[in-house]
């Protein structure tokens, strides 16, 4: 079975490797994004994780950031693929995905129709879910609405962040993708439609929707921080500067200080706390604008605290 694989980030790599390792499948082309700075905007351009993996496997690679171009549609059509597999790539036009003789399959990191959109892993943790999973479905014109082929569940560890969960889901996803391809190859696919009454959204993460609201309960704030770690990272402001918070934990100061206004910074017994609507959250690792990522203990060594007057806002 001739397969074109499309993906860019690390999440897609296990699926690419799993397909390449199976003798029943022939990977004829790997499509990914162009080289660009990936660690920070000032870094040198570097290949995507999928491109790096494809090169190591000796697979042909085509790079594009414009999936709507005529050139791209012509390249895909010329390959005469049986199946296109998409994992964490761009939204494809029908002129591209309809070129696959047996259909185009997307791997989505949620149990659809839950969390349609760009950031399903993040929003499932932010919303305090204790279970998630992966779904394969056939692409249709409306994003993330296609008929479901396979789904597998996974429990979310209360202590893991979005990066940790994405890594585990990527491995599960690779298994589901290969199982899906076997079903397609043997013409044994039985699809199910998505229940529109159960739809929820996972919108793109932006500066506006990643800011911490300290007026929320401790559990909600902690889930918010976990759901955005380690990228793009939840943020707040401190003394007029942006502060990213990478890790926190529900807790209370040793002195059991009375609950203060949400966002109030409190230092006790060498630990850094922030007040929420119903209790205290211990901040464990952070990065103040213009400085490196550090543990809270390191930050406190150079921190002058004026009780009840300094806030995260």
Image (spheres, rainbow, N blue to C red):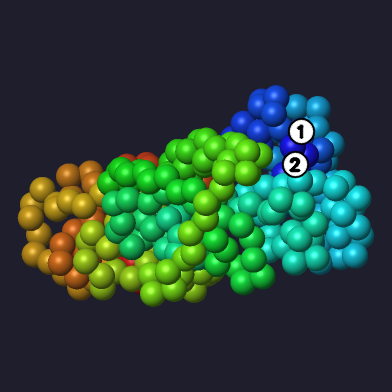
Q: Residue at x 87, y 46 (%)?
A: 79
Q: Is residue 54 above or below residue 155?
A: above
Q: Which residue lies furthest to the front in this view?
A: 187
Residue 96 visible in rendering: yes
Left or right placement of residue 42 versus residue 205 in this view:
right
In what quadrant of the picture does the N terminus appear?
top right
Left or right placement of residue 291 versus residue 12 in this view:
left
Q: Which residue in the structure is indicated by mark 1?
A: 26
Q: Which residue is drawn at 8% across and 64% down?
A: 258
Name the foreground residue: 134 vs 125.
134
In what quadrant of the picture does the C terminus appear?
bottom left
Q: How packed is label 2: few (under 14 Cα within 10 Å), some, or many (20 or more)?
A: many
Residue 33 visible in rendering: no
Image position, residue 57 (x, y; %): 75, 27
Q: In this view, does 79 lie above or below 245?
A: above
Image position, residue 142 (x, y; %): 62, 71
Whether label 2 touches label 1, CB < 8 Å = yes
Q: Which residue in the structure is indicated by mark 2?
A: 3
Q: What element carries label 2?
A: strand
Q: Residue at x 76, y 33 (%)?
A: 26
Of the image marks 2 and 1, the number of the one nearer the N terminus: 2
Q: How far apart are marks 2 and 1 (CA)?
A: 6 Å
Q: Which residue is drawn at 38% across and 51% down?
A: 132
Give the mark count.
2
């Amino acid at each position: 079975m001739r397969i074109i694989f499309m993906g860019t980030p690390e999440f897609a790599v296990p699926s690419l490797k799993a397909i390449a390792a199976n003798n029943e499948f022939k990977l004829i082309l790997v499509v990914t994004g162009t080289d660009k700075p990936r660690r920070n905007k000032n870094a040198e351009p570097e290949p995507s994780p999928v491109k790096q993996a494809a090169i190591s496997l000796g697979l042909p690679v085509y790079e594009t950031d414009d999936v709507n171009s005529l050139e791209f549609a012509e390249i895909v059509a010329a390959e005469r693929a049986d199946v296109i597999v998409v994992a964490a790539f761009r939204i494809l036009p029908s002129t591209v995905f309809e070129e696959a003789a047996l259909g185009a399959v997307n791997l989505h990191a949620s149990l659809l129709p839950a969390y349609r959109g760009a950031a399903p892993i993040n929003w499932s943790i932010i919303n305090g879910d204790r279970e998630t999973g992966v779904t394969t479905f056939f692409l249709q014109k409306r994003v993330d609405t296609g008929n479901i082929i396979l789904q597998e569940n996974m429990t979310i560890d209360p202590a893991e962040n979005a990066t940790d969960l994405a890594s585990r889901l990527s491995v599960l996803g690779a298994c589901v993708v290969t199982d899906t391809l076997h079903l397609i190859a043997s013409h044994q696919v039985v699809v199910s439609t998505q229940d529109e009454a159960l739809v929820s959204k996972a919108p793109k993460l932006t500066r506006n929707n990643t800011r911490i609201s300290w007026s929320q309960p401790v559990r909600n704030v902690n889930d918010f921080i976990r759901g955005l770690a380690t990228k793009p990272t939840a943020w707040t402001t401190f003394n007029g500067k942006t502060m990213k918070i990478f890790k926190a934990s529900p807790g209370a100061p040793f002195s059991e200080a009375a609950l203060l206004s949400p966002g109030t910074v409190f230092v006790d017994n060498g630990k850094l706390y922030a007040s929420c609507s119903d209790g205290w959250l211990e901040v464990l690792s952070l990065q103040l604008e213009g400085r490196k990522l550090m543990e809270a203990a390191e930050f406190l060594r150079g921190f002058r605290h004026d009780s009840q007057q300094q806030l995260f806002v």
